[in-house]
Image (tube, helix red, strand yellow):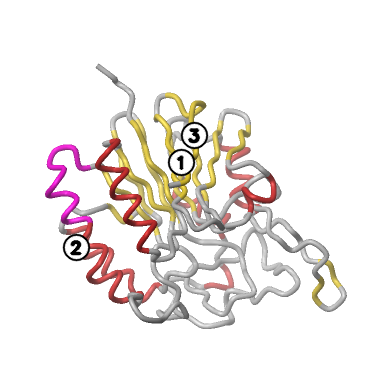
Amino acid sequence: MNDQDLVFFVSDLHGKLSRYDSLFSEIINSRPAVLLMGGDLLPHAHARGPGRLSAEEFAEEYLPKKFGQLKEKMGNDYPLVLLILGNDDPRFFEPLFIESEKKGLWKYLHMNWVDYKEFRFYGYSMIPPTPFQLKDWERFDVSRYTDPGCIPPNEGSRTVNPEVDIEHTSIQKELAALTDGHYLNKSIFLFHSPPYKGNLDRAALDGKMFENVPLDVHLGSIAIQRFIEEKQPLITLHGHIHESTRLTGYWSEQSGKTFSFNAATDSPELSIVKFYLQDPGTAKRVLL
């Protein structure tokens, strides 16, 4: 009997039906114990056209229907599904994900945690400031500094009113609040942002400038990087920077005792990181 728990991690599916079809088929074939979804799940607001679903149709109809069918088909083998949203997912649709949680389809994990056996899963959606206008899932990182070319999170646009004082909130402060008093040696963190300046946050910004200032090619979070170094969770999971694996050749890295994986891709296939909770060092990434 295999006493190891197989986990699937995916991120940045961006509402692409072919990726979801591949995911559902692989779940049925491999029967993972846990499915983790790291944000940017919905179609982009500008991805319109024949045969494409809107973000609202995806959140309200497609995902609940597909996961409901999967749960009915798999019965007791249906995985524990844990998910967060990403910076391209309008927060306006967050209540739809919370409503589907009440139906037992998944657990919505942002700023929360779920226990599974001796492990604890945490979720956190926020990313550092970007050049993009939508700021639903952005925070200052460790200070109010904003990289050249980026728009501060207290500017831009939002689909809902912020639940905190944006000017005085940071990723660093929220991670501290989320884990205050917690023992993290068997914790798994589902982030959208990668940590700063490693193998997982490399963007294709080589040689690009903003007002004569070179742009940083690393777009991850300093707060998440420091959190990993200081707190040493068992596993951290990331997405957001699609091209990083192609540019660096790495989808994983290790900091001390912490294993970190990136499931985002800029290829058309579905990227799945598969690992066992009891043996994360044997993780593998497959494209389907």
The residue under label 2 is which amino acid type?
Answer: Lys
Q: Judge whether 95 appears above or below 258 on screen.
A: below
How crowded pointer 3 is (Cα within 10 Å; few <14, some 14-19, many 20+) is rated as some
The residue under label 1 is which amino acid type?
Answer: Val
Dot 3 or dot 2: first in sequence order is 2
Pointer 3: what residue?
284
Q: Which mark is residue 194?
A: none
**Residue shown at 63% from the left, 38% from the top:** 229
Q: Position of residue 6 (x, y in %)?
A: 34, 32
How crowded pointer 2 is (Cα within 10 Å; few <14, some 14-19, many 20+) is rated as some
Dot 1 or dot 3: first in sequence order is 1
Q: Which mark is residue 65?
A: 2
**Residue shown at 61% from the left, 37% from the top:** 253
Front residue of 50/75: it is: 50
**Residue shown at 34% from the left, 57% from the top:** 20
Q: Which residues are magenta?
A: 67-78
Q: Secondary structure at mark 3?
A: strand
In the rendered structure, are the residues bearing label 3 and label 2 in contact, judged by CB atoms less than 8 Å apart? Answer: no
In the rendered structure, are the residues bearing label 1 and label 3 in contact, judged by CB atoms less than 8 Å apart? Answer: yes
Q: CA distance from mark 1 to mark 2?
A: 24 Å
How crowded pointer 1 is (Cα within 10 Å; few <14, some 14-19, many 20+) is rated as many
In the rendered structure, are the residues bearing label 1 and label 2 in contact, judged by CB atoms less than 8 Å apart? Answer: no
Pointer 1: what residue?
273
Residue 59 seen from this side: yes
Q: CA distance from mark 3 to mark 2?
A: 29 Å
The residue under label 3 is which amino acid type?
Answer: Lys
Front residue of 131/61: it is: 61
Q: Position of residue 266 (x, y in %)?
A: 56, 58
Dot 1 or dot 2: first in sequence order is 2
